[in-house]
Amino acid sequence: QVHLVESGGGLVQPGGSLRLSCAASGIRFSNYVMGWYRQAPGKERELVARITTTRFTNYPDSVKGRFTISRDNAKNTLYLQMNSLKPEDTAVYFCTAGLITLGDYWGQGTQVTVSS
């Protein structure tokens, strides 16, 4: 059975940083494209960051230069370092995995709230 478990969310002030983690089990982690999505209240789920099996990364313009995705295949763990956080980054952040494209498996999500 596949499990993706996110952690590291919380409340942070604007300009602050958070590091999200996603622990994967039940899959051969190194074979999967991994990514982070987020969903704010009343909005559609949007891609935040993606990393391929060869560690190629891509980001939307809204987070480029502020967020960094990385993976540790030895630990079966995905990370998202988020710096210079803004109130508009407030959302539930989801970890996802896919063999070809993202979305085969999803975590339950972790809340990130950016507020003073």
Image (cartoon, grey):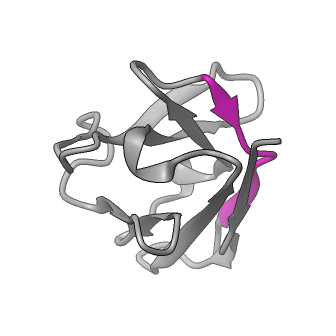
Q: Which residues are magenta?
A: 104-113
Q: Residue 21, percent across and down?
A: 57, 68
Residue 89 drawn above or below residue 40: below
Which residue does the image show at 76% across and 33% down from the upper left?
Answer: 41
Residue 4 drawn above or below residue 41: below
Q: Is residue 79 left or right of residue 22?
A: left
Residue 33: quarter of image: top left
Residue 11 drawn above or below residue 54: below
Q: Any magenta on residue 112? A: yes
Prevailing secondary structure of the magenta residues: strand
Q: Residue 29, percent across and down?
A: 49, 51
Q: Any magenta on residue 48? A: no
**Quadrant of the image containing the N terminus:** top right
Which residue does the image show at 27% across and 61% down from the upper left?
Answer: 66
Which residue does the image show at 35% across and 70% down from the upper left?
Answer: 84
The number of numbered discs placed on residues in the rendered structure image is 0
Residue in front for this viewpoint, 96 or 90: 96
Q: Is residue 22 left or right of residue 102?
A: right
